[in-house]
Image: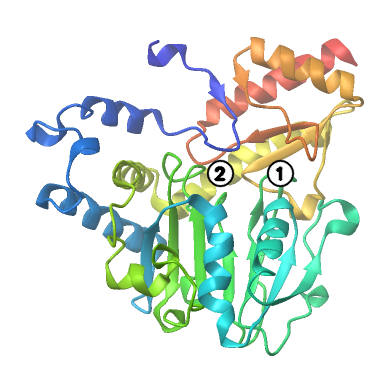
Amino acid sequence: MSSTDRIYNFSAGPSILPLSVLEHAAAEMTNYKNSGMSVMEMSHRSSIYIDIFEETKADLKRLVGVPDTHEILFMHGGATLQFSAVPMNLIGKTGQADYAVTGNFSSLAMKEAKKYGEVKIACSSEDKNHIYIPAQEDIKVSCNASYFYYCSNNTIFGTEWKYIPDTGDVPLVCDMSSNILSVPIDVSKYGAIFAGVQKNMAPAGMAVVIIDKALAGSELSFTPKLLSYQVMMDSDSMHNTPPCYTIYMLGLVLKWLEKQGGIEGMEVIKAKKAKILYDVLDDSKLFSGCAEKDARSDMNVTFRTLSEELDSKFIKEALAAGFDNLKGHRIAGGMRASIYNAMPAEGVQALAGFMREFEAANH
């Protein structure tokens, strides 16, 4: 299959990667920079791989703006393993933590944290099936919480936090899996940030953790070594073999991101792409958006038609037209178009055109 045969892949994750990155990786697949080896085959302790590792880490630090007070970790297990790692490393200070429950993954993270300490729900959007983000005045922060946890973008329900919660002296912990690298962030305001890489950063198999160094070192006594932020900091993420190829791919994505104008440039691009689809929804009599307008995600556009039967018809016909993975999550139903950084604007425009054609034929 040539590049011209590629479909528009709107998967929520693992998701689309930039075509130029895939082609670059393919060209180096069997022989990286005349080494006679694939990156997949290299020792993680070799000088050639250490160069890849250090350059990727340095590029991420520069592009995201990670201050020297924080450390970047490359950890196994994706974001879901961080649901355990966060409380294991951070809840021990007071034995308590606050969670904002605004979707499925923050709910799962909260339930996992309850195994390791006392957890309080500081705010929730469950009363309206997670179609909105609570306002600052609706957040109740406990003064004795070890940390406050939230998920900045909710892939299943298509909502996104448009502000950073004010939690006073309580450290902020944020799951940024599905919108990292799409909007500038002030890392200094966070105690910890983590992201599964398979949406906006790289192929699946790793989580990036950005941790305030001052918060590490207080893990619960039974914390596995590979989940200890302090152990991973001390070994520069190489206590054992790291996800070598995923780190290499992340490095290529970061080079691509820089060509788009960095995160600031990507913020402009992603807002324009999202507006294309939301304009269709706002003008439509057949389609309707699922999330409240002031909480709409720029990464995951959730919508539905007038009936489940018509939803199914749309998904089937969209697939035949070259638009894949538009079926909504089983929890939410409807449709979901995930338009992460690598989704080209022409893909979004093509989907918008198909939606208009489908409405004209079915309304």
Q: Is residue 10 above or below residue 219?
A: above
Task: Give me the residue at 39% from left, 51% from top.
Answer: 262
Task: Give me the residue at 33% from left, 62% from top.
Answer: 62
Q: Counting other residues with Cα less than 10 Å from the Cα at mark 1, is it few (<14), some (14-19), or many (20 or more)?
A: many
Q: Nearer the viewer, residue 126 or 158?
A: 126
* Residue 26 visible in the displayed image: yes
Which numbered tag is attached to residue 270? 2
Q: Percent from the top left, x then y, of residue 34?
A: 8, 32
Q: Amino acid at mark 1?
A: Ile
Q: Which corner quadrant holds the N terminus?
A: top left
Q: Quickly name the residue at label 1.
A: 156
Q: Counting other residues with Cα less than 10 Å from the Cα at mark 2, is it few (<14), some (14-19), or many (20 or more)?
A: many
Of callouts 2 and 1, the N-terminal one: 1
Rounded to the nearest angstrom, the CA distance separating label 2 from label 1 is 18 Å
- Callout in the foreground (2, 1): 1
The image quadrant of residue 125 is bottom right
Q: Percent from the top left, x then y, of residue 138?
A: 82, 74
Q: Amino acid at mark 2?
A: Lys
Q: Percent from the top left, x then y, of residue 305?
A: 86, 27
Q: Percent from the top left, x then y, of residue 154?
A: 68, 51
Q: Nearer the viewer, residue 337 or 90?
A: 90
The image quadrant of residue 39 is top left
